[in-house]
Amino acid sequence: MGPLRLPVVIILALAACSATEQERPGDVLLISVDTLRPDHMSAHGYGRPTTPQLERWFEAGARFSRAYSTAASTPPGVVSILTGLLPQDHGVRTF
């Protein structure tokens, strides 16, 4: 794991453990993969079974065919996903 990922994982794990059952509105699974091409995923219609486990998850969940990022590189984009802030507001530019 990179230097940014470990603290984020720890923060998310602690946040998940702190809420009671009544406070949790539902389960959310965020899969963030850098440079995964949908045209090579069987879950998006590719001929070979390249992503069978993701297909199982997608059967009961939401799948989006378009996504936009707040930045062209991974670190500021992921921080924006997790904080809801734009790169100019959270200040992350590179590793």
Image: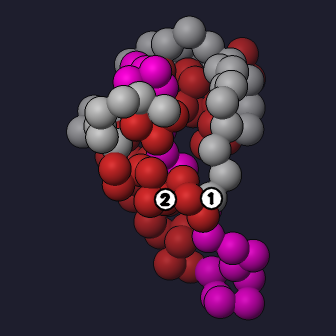
Location of residue 53 in the rendering, given as x and y in whole percent from the top left corner = 35, 54
Secondary element at image label 2 = helix
Indicate yes or no whether the magenta region holds residue 29. yes
Whether residue 2 is situated above or below residue 52 in the rendered picture: above
Instruction: Name above or below for residue 86 compared with residue 5.
Output: above
Q: Position of residue 4 (x, y in %)?
A: 38, 35
At 57% from the left and 24% from the top, the residue drawn is 77
Q: Are marks 2 and 1 in contact (CB under 8 Å)?
A: yes
Q: Main secondary structure of the magenta part?
A: loop
Q: Is residue 52 above or below residue 27?
A: above
Q: Is residue 63 visible?
A: yes
Q: Which mark is residue 57?
A: 2
Q: What segment is highlighted magenta in the picture?
A: 19-41
Quarter of the rendering containing residue 87: top right
Tell me the residue at 34%/50% (across/down). 52
Answer left or right for 85 relative to 69.
right
- Residue 61: mark: 1
Quick check: 83 left or right of 7?
A: right
Instruction: Classify residue 2 by image quadrant.
Output: top left
